[in-house]
Image (tube, rainbow, N blue to C red):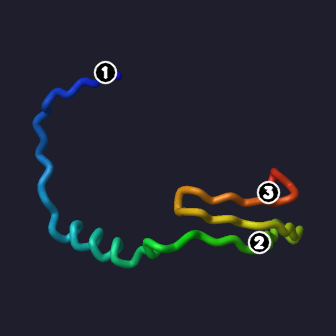
Amino acid sequence: MMSNQEAYPTDAQDDPEARELLRRAFEKTARWPADCNGFSADLTVNVDGKVFTGTVTVKSAQDVTVSLPDAEV
């Protein structure tokens, strides 16, 4: 893989207020404990009054499987 890494001048400045807003937002995000092995649960989805039931399996934030009888849902 090739990349072009030329330096371009920028006038970007640090913004302490924006940095503080991002820090506060990050503090409010949920994080799983290191020993969390995930979970599975029954799932009910209502789309315009039509109810579908299935399951959701979460192994990590990046590994989530939803099983429903209708793939269109």
Task: Report the mark closest to the observer, 3 or 1.
Answer: 1
Name which of mark 3 and mark 2 comes first in the sequence.
Answer: 2
The quadrant of the image that shows the N terminus is top left
Along the viewing direction, whichever of 49 and 27 lies nearer the viewer = 27
* Relative height, residue 71 to residue 38 (above, below): above
Circle count: 3
Q: Quadrant of residue 15?
A: bottom left
Q: Which residue is mark 2?
A: 43
Q: Is residue 30 visible?
A: no
Q: Which residue is mark 1?
A: 2
Asked whether the beta carbons under mark 3 and mark 1 sit within 8 Å of each other, the answer is no
Name which of mark 3 and mark 1 comes first in the sequence.
Answer: 1
Name which residue type carries label 3: Val
Along the viewing direction, whichever of 51 and 56 lies nearer the viewer = 56
| Left or right: 63 in relation to 56 | left
Asked whether the beta carbons under mark 2 and mark 1 sit within 8 Å of each other, the answer is no
The residue at 31%/21% (across/down) is: 2
Along the viewing direction, whichever of 12 and 42 lies nearer the viewer = 42
Q: Residue furthest top?
A: 2
Name which residue type carries label 1: Met
Name which residue type carries label 2: Leu
Q: Which mark is residue 73?
A: 3
Q: Residues within 10 Å of mark 2 (few under 14, many from 20)?
A: some
Q: Quadrant of residue 64?
A: bottom right
| Left or right: 58 in relation to 3 | right
